[in-house]
Image (cartoon, rainbow, N blue to C red):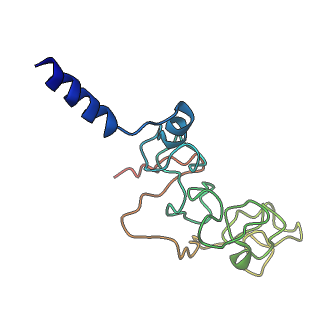
């Protein structure tokens, strides 16, 4: 009986892969979003991971930068350069608030240096039905209903 137990123990150990503590740490996923600490740019927030849906203009970099989509955002305003009317100024992007009526800057990219009278809704090609909107801290926006 002792030989059978030893044989079973040996077979169990042979089939058990070894993982170093460094390998374990790289695979650990603190926020349970499917991305380990080595790949996830914010492993404390399950809404932020590479290739996540990233709505433009919400202030949250949900997809960890231009990961996988090739979009470049030079000024860090959460609008890619090809959709931003001033890719060097983080205060200028579609539907941004106008600082004042006559500052000489078209902050909201509508072609005028005036405050908008309409409710500007930025067109976001990344918007996917059913994907929760996030705020600037990358937390879901709670809509009172």
Q: Nearer the viewer, residue 2 or 79?
A: 2
Q: Position of residue 43 (x, y in %)?
A: 54, 42
Q: Is residue 126 rendered to the left or right of residue 32?
A: right
The quarter of the picture where the N terminus appears is top left
User: Residue placed at 56% from the left, 72% from the top?
Assistant: 121
Q: Position of residue 60 (x, y in %)?
A: 60, 54
Q: Looking at the picture, does residue 8 appear above or below residue 139?
A: above
Q: Nearer the viewer, residue 50 or 141?
A: 50
Q: Identify the residue at the far front of this view.
A: 3
Q: Nearer the viewer, residue 112 or 40?
A: 40
Q: Looking at the picture, does residue 52 appear above or below residue 21?
A: below
Classify residue 17 by image quadrant.
Answer: top left
Q: Nearer the viewer, residue 69 or 87?
A: 69
Q: Looking at the picture, does residue 101 appear above or below residue 141?
A: below
User: Residue placed at 56% from the left, 56% from the top?
Assistant: 62
Q: Identify the residue at the far left of this view.
A: 1
Q: Is residue 119 rendered to the left or right of residue 80?
A: left
Q: Identify the residue at the far top of this view.
A: 2
Q: Position of residue 61 (x, y in %)?
A: 61, 56
User: How many dots with numbers?
Assistant: 0
Q: Looking at the picture, does residue 138 appear above or below residue 104?
A: above
Q: Is residue 104 rendered to the left or right of residue 108?
A: right
Q: Position of residue 84 (x, y in %)?
A: 73, 74
């Amino acid at each position: 009986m002792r030989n059978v137990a030893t044989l079973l123990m040996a077979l169990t150990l042979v089939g058990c892969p070894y993982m170093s503590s460094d390998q374990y740490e790289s695979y650990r996923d603190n926020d349970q979003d499917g991305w380990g600490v080595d790949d996830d740019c914010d492993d404390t927030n399950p809404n932020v991971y590479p290739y996540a849906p990233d709505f433009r203009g919400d202030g949250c970099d949900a997809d960890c930068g231009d990961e996988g989509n090739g979009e470049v955002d030079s000024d860090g305003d959460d609008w890619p350069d090809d959709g931003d009317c001033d890719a060097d100024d983080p205060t200028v992007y579609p539907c941004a608030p106008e600082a004042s009526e006559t500052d000489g800057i078209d902050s909201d990219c509508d072609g005028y240096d005036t405050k908008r009278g309409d409710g500007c809704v930025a067109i976001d090609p990344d918007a996917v039905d059913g994907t929760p909107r996030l705020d600037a801290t990358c937390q879901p926006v709670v809509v009172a209903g």
